[in-house]
Image (cartoon, grey):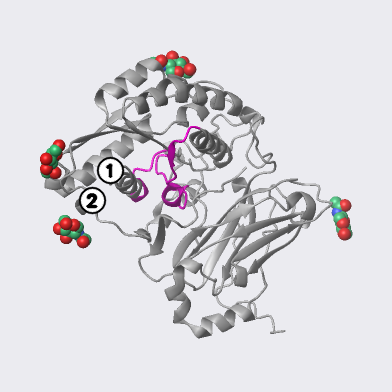
């Protein structure tokens, strides 16, 4: 048995304010294993292979600060580099946080989000996380607990408080893009959030507000596509096409970025027009809306859910109701468009960072990661049922899900990259 060599370098334990509902453990992990997709990187370093063995089971320290889950209720958090797995072992007799819902992010030369499985929680009190990184090296990991109960279709979204109750993400696992550090200064990437009382501009420069809300932490990373494409080439001699983003402000941002991207391509993009069709709620995808889209669009990318889950219309649309309304929209809005030969896609709704309204209890805005996942699960499930295409851009928008400067919209390189990906996906066929 090789001596346990707990990576000595850069071991840091960082305490994060209890306001961010943190579980856990910021820790540098040495020599993460990489995915099968990365055969080349696998070749590079035989020494790295050996040190995987040396750090076969690595204990990740717990943050013992007051949090949603009592540290005494966590048996251990273990990193198993061999299988690129993180095991969160809970105590059977735990009294706090029965079903912790986790978000985990690795940061280092690349960023990666951990994909958690809760299947073993009931019988073995363990949550299993898998990660994939494009290259080995030292990484930090930060794990936060968002809720203490798993959401399901019947959960009352309105009263689901972050970290006092309740699901999480199963999407976006390194298939579209990865983000890489531009320079080599390794820094842990902490989850960005807005503490209560940091809304007013007067508070912005206080350390209490400035540090957790600062977006500069994301600047060192840049996106790269696993499978690069050349949009200019794809759009060469493309027949005239009108692409419509159907949805509210997030669709507006995608329209803007798409126009910028196409404009830069000049000649090749002359034939492509991008429009937004501003429909806010799923209930607004009616027959009238269908006629409007049918008359002006060849292709439609629908993104819906932000308004339904927001505070603007009073209570959030419950999951059951969202599913019922979306099914109705499939019937009166989507199917007739398909019959009229409009090419229709759904896209996932975006995560929102942990702003003060979202983390308040009871919340006054319900677009927390867990609810967003539920809405997206419902949408992708109905897309399967109706044989429609669901474009999942969470590889792009999920990895820095907490970066939006205005606490809502990706008016940054994440949004630009998403627009590029959508154009490629929708226009290249
Ligand atoms: C759970 O069990 C462990 C021993 O297995 C004990 O030390 C601990 O106090 C127990 N916790 C509670 C909350 O009962
Ligand atoms: C992309 O394709 C265009 C047109 O075929 C070509 O002019 C351009 O050099 C290509 N760009 C890259 C980065 O390969
Ligand atoms: C625009 O579309 C027409 C057909 O609709 C095609 O003949 C033409 O080549 C396209 N123009 C460009 C610049 O791609
Ligand atoms: C859109 O749907 C909402 C929620 O059902 C409704 O209140 C609103 O009147 C609708 N707007 C339009 C323009 O139909």
**In the image: residue 324, left or right of residue 231:** right
- Quarter of the picture holding the N terminus: bottom right
For disc 1, the neighbor class at 10 Å (few under 14, some 14 to 19, many from 20) is some
The C terminus is located in which quarter? top left
Mark sitting on residue 234: 2
Badge 2 local density, few (<14 within 10 Å), some, or many (20+)? some
| Helix, strand or loop for disc 2 | helix
The magenta segment:
386-415
Q: Is residue 169 visible?
A: yes
222 to 316, vertically: above or below: below
Tag 1 residue: 427
- Which secondary structure, mark 1? helix
Residue 29: x percent and y percent?
57, 70
Q: Residue at x 30, y 23 (%)?
A: 294
Q: Is residue 331 magenta?
A: no
Q: Main secondary structure of the magenta part?
A: loop
């Amino acid at each position: 048995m090789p001596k346990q060599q707990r990576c000595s370098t850069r071991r840091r334990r960082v305490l994060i304010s209890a306001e961010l509902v943190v579980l856990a453990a910021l820790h540098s992990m040495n020599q993460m294993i990489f995915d099968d997709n990365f055969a080349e990187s696998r070749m590079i370093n035989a020494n790295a292979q050996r040190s995987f063995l040396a750090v076969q089971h690595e204990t990740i320290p717990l943050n013992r600060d007051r949090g949603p889950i009592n540290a005494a209720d966590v048996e251990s958090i273990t990193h198993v580099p061999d299988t690129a797995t993180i095991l969160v072992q809970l105590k059977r007799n735990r009294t706090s946080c029965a079903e912790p819902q986790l978000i985990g992010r690795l940061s280092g030369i690349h960023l990666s989000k951990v994909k958690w499985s809760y299947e073993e929680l009931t019988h073995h009190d363990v949550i299993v996380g898998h990660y994939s990184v494009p290259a080995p090296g030292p990484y930090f990991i930060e794990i936060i607990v968002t809720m203490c109960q798993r959401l399901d279709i019947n959960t009352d979204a309105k009263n689901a408080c972050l970290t006092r109750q309740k699901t999480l993400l199963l999407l976006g696992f390194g298939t579209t893009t990865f983000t890489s550090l531009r320079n080599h200064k390794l820094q842990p990437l902490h989850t960005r959030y807005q503490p209560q009382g940091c809304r007013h501009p007067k508070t912005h420069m206080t350390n209490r507000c400035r540090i957790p809300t600062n977006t500069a932490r994301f600047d060192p990373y840049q996106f790269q596509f696993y499978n690069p494409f050349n949009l200019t080439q794809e759009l060469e001699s493309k027949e005239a096409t009108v692409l419509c983003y159907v949805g509210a402000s997030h669709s507006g941002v995608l329209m803007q970025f798409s126009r910028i991207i196409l404009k830069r391509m000049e000649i090749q993009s002359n034939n492509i027009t991008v429009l937004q069709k501003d429909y806010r709620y799923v209930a607004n995808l009616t027959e009238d809306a269908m006629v409007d889209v049918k008359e002006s669009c060849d292709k439609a990318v629908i993104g819906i859910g932000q308004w339904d889950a927001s505070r603007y219309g009073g209570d959030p649309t419950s999951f059951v109701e969202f599913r019922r309304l979306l099914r109705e929209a499939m019937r009166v809005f989507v199917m007739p468009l398909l019959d009229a030969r409009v090419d229709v896609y759904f896209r996932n709704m975006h995560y929102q960072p942990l702003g003060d309204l979202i983390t308040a209890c009871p919340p006054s805005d319900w677009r927390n990661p867990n609810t967003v996942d539920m809405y997206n699960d419902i949408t992708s499930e109905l897309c399967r049922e109706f044989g429609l295409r669901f474009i999942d851009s969470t590889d792009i928008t999920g990895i820095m899900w907490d970066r939006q400067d205005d606490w809502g919209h990706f008016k940054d390189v994440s949004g630009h990259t998403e627009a590029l990906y959508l154009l490629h996906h929708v226009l290249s066929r």
